[in-house]
Image: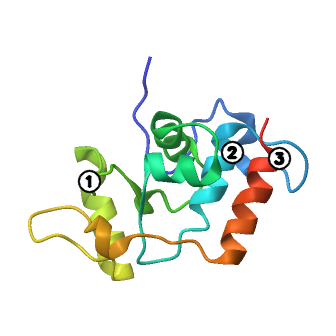
Amino acid sequence: MRTEREPGHRRSEHPEAEGPPAQGPLTVLEALAEAARLVPPGRAVSYGALAGLLGVGGPRQAGRAMAESGPGTPWWRVLRADGTLPEHLAAPAARQHEREGTPRRRTSGVDMAGAAWHPTPAQRRALEALAARTR
């Protein structure tokens, strides 16, 4: 049964809600949430692209990771490929996008071409390190 919760906050039944361990193995969901933290303000990435950059999981796992991630995870920077989010997340995400200066489309959603995240070499190394820890 699905429960309603604020985006970006884990359900209380998840004992790992404090975040992933600093060292040791990570679950796919933990690794995807950590990868989302690498996306800088004003940039965006699709669920599928995030999973592809990390080399684990897929769009559904990335969406689940954002839904179950702990506070501090910038879930609003990880979107559908068309630059939108589910309707119940659109308004809080729009406030964050406005605050961060994320390029937007005239109609609604993020301009994914203008906001595309292209990881720096250091961010790519961090993604590789996360992937290596993923079980």
* Place of residue 98 in the rendered image (x, y in percent of width and height, measured from the top left): 29, 77
Q: Nearer the viewer, residue 40 or 121?
A: 121
Image-based side of 59 in relation to 69, left or right: left
User: The disc labelled 3 sits on which kind of residue?
Assistant: Arg
- The dot on residue 133 is 3
Of the numbered discs 1 and 2, the one sitting upstream in the chain is: 2
Disc 2 marks which residue? 30
Q: CA distance from mark 3 to mark 1?
A: 30 Å
Q: Nearer the viewer, mark 3 or mark 1?
A: 3
Q: Is residue 28 visible?
A: yes
* Place of residue 94 in the rendered image (x, y in percent of width and height, measured from the top left): 27, 66
Relative to 22, is 9 above or below? above
Q: The residue tagged with tag 3: helix, strand or loop?
A: helix
User: The disc labelled 2 sits on which kind of residue?
Assistant: Glu
Relative to 99, is 81 above or below? above
Q: The residue tagged with tag 1: helix, strand or loop?
A: loop
Q: CA distance from mark 1 to mark 2?
A: 23 Å
Q: Is residue 70 visible?
A: no
- The residue sitting at the right extreme is 24
Q: Are marks 3 and 1 in contact (CB under 8 Å)?
A: no
Q: The residue tagged with tag 2: helix, strand or loop?
A: helix
Disc 1 marks which residue? 84
Q: Which residue does the image show at 33% across and 83% down from the upper left?
A: 101
Image-based side of 122 in relation to 52, left or right: right
Q: Which residue does the image show at 58% across and 71% down from the upper left?
A: 119
- The residue sitting at the top extreme is 1
Q: Image quadrant for the C terminus?
A: top right
Relative to 101, is 65 above or below? above
Q: Which residue does the image show at 78% across and 42% down from the upper left?
A: 26
Image-based side of 119 in relation to 121, left or right: left
Q: Residues within 10 Å of mark 1 (few under 14, many from 20)?
A: many
The way the protein has been coloured in the rendering is rainbow
